[in-house]
Image: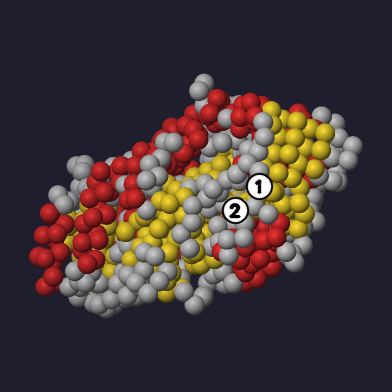
Amino acid sequence: MLSPRDEEYIKNQLGRDLSPLEYACFENLWSEHCSYRSTKPLLRSLPTNGENVLLGPGDDAAIVKFSDDIALAIGMESHNHPSYVDPYDGAATGVGGIVRDIISMGARPVALMDPLFFGDLSGEKNRYIFEHVVAGIGDYGNCIGVPVVRGDLVFDNRYSGNPLVNVVCVGVVHPDKYLTARVKKPGSRLILYGSSTGRDGLGGASFASRDLSEDSESEDRPAVQVGDPYTEKLLIEATLELAATGKILSCRDLGAAGLAGASSEMSETFGARLYADRVHLREENMSEVEIFLAESQERMLIEVQPEDIDEITAIIGKYDLKWSDIGEVISEPKYIVSFNDEIVCDLPIDLLVGGAPEEAWSGSPRDAVKEYRRPETSLKDLCIKVLSHPDIAKKDWVSRQYDHDVQLGSVSLGGGAACLRLGDAGLFLSCGCSPGQIYLRPYEGTANAVYENAANLAVMGAEPLCIVNCLNFASPVHDEIFWEISESVRGMGDMCRRLGIPVVGGNVSLYNESDEFGTRIPPTPTIGMVGKGVVRKYRPAADGQKLVLIGRCDGGMGGSVLDGITGCGGDAPAIPDVSVLDLVRALVRDGKISSATDISHGGLLAAVVYLAGTADLKLSGDPVETLLSESYGRFLLAVEDEESLEGLDYELIGTAGGASLKILFDNEGLILGKDEIDSAINTTTKIMRY
């Protein structure tokens, strides 16, 4: 519902009461999910311009130049609350929604990424949500023929009752031929096409802008959309063929707030007159509120000239999709809706779209850092526990449910970042963040999330082009939560400026709290990064190759996987020297190293296991901190000989290969057999066989 303050403000602006449809339009379009009213001032501080940015934030997706004849359409969205209430459909329609954002730009979707965050897998309900979210993403993506090439998995009890399902989609379009979502000419027609409108998804935008309660699974289920990937596949091909005619003036997909959201935001530059009784429906006796606010999936809205309607609708019909001419663009800045010859909505369009007063929350810092205490458990047990943690263990149980090879563009999925072939170059993709560290130090933790994704590209020899983000937080009404948001955005912006990476779009998802579990999610500003480089396939270290460390960073153990397991505490890692990224990138490009990985989640231990499998190492320092610290700015490299690193500051730590992982410290030794390592890193697969 509208807050009493908002309702009074609107009535004062209009000088009258609201009709039911007007009330519903404001309730959804002024929700946090649509208006970003709590975060707009913060988002304005982000660097959004760059030499390759053709279209930045504000449209369905951003457009970034990749080459002279290829541009990328990139967007990121969340479908968090729906994925708790109905995990399969919530996740599936999250994929469908972000894909439509890409095709609305006239771009063909070529890749998906899915950073996912769940409660501890020891809970049966969390396992159920995890299983069905993955199935929903896999089934929808596989059916529409768009590969999921990258993802991230974090498990933390603070996500119990409020999982996070974030999705990135990247598409390709000619740099001179992309569409936009703002109407161009009064007198043009607005054509709705795709699935018929039903009552599913009613109030989805407002539902996404409030806390989840114990009754959400039953009470809020009607707010969850149900997807049809087979119709979406037709929608993709139809929209691309429509775009190729050059006769689509503007295009927008129907997502949050349904037809009301798409048509009003699309028409903001002029105005619109719409007819609710012309919309093709799936159910009988629907009211104007249901027609305009339902979030039925697989629907698009386009602007065309009257003389082009026959040609355009013939293409739509060829794909066996329904369509309706539902109204026109008008020169008067008003949003007018008629139903059965009666005007049921007549609003100033600038008040409805973008007119929500910004929220002025106050932020109050808190200190969550605990003093570090070295765990008393044996080093071997700690290492096994870290490798067994589902954040670190193999993700095969998830990835094998996704078709990575559809479209035949995937070159490499392992290592730091996925690589797809686009023309003569490689498109590289990475995503994720470390919520445990961000909780301790939101500024440093978010800056490091940007850095770590850039590091994932660097070890593949790729240069970042841009990032998108999804700002997932609890309720901003809490002073410490708004402080987390403010500090995270500040850290993201500062690191992006240091690295010269523009922030071209994203999504804000607040009110991620659960009354049922009494939980608030930790701050989770998820990053999606794309870059460009020479097409490269990741290869792990070969037996006999030298393993060396390069780069240094002072950092704490706080927020690490080890901290999550043992509660050992410590400060979050400091922000590293960014110059080492250029150094590592150059080493990869020049062929001086065979393979590389950055040191992050799971520390040096996980880096060695996933780069080399087994090895013979000699290390110094405190064994726990040396192996399990997740401080950034360090890279593990595999080389044939040390001559390729002549003149560089590096540390030779051992040799790849052997029957076990042998690690010798000054006063302590450790041996992990290959069977022990394999058993540990396959833990998630074993858990999901419950």
Q: What kind of element bears circle 1?
A: loop
Q: How many marks?
A: 2
Residue that carries the numbered disc 1 in the rendered image: 545
Q: Position of residue 309 (x, y in %)?
A: 13, 67
- As drawn, the residue found furthest toward the right would be 667
Which residue corresponds to the image point at 64% horizontal and 67% vertical from the top-left? Answer: 582
Question: Contact, CB < 8 Å: mark 1 with mark 2?
Answer: yes
Q: Nearer the viewer, residue 573 or 388?
A: 388
| Image quadrant assignment for residue 373 | top right
Q: Which mark is residue 594?
A: 2
Q: Amino acid at mark 1?
A: Gln
Q: Is residue 221 above or below residue 501?
A: above
Q: Position of residue 79 (x, y in %)?
A: 46, 47
280 horizontally vs 346: left or right: left
Q: What kind of element bears circle 2?
A: loop
Q: Position of residue 541 (x, y in %)?
A: 61, 46
Q: Is residue 94 in view from this perspective?
A: no
| Pointer 1 or 2: first along the chain | 1
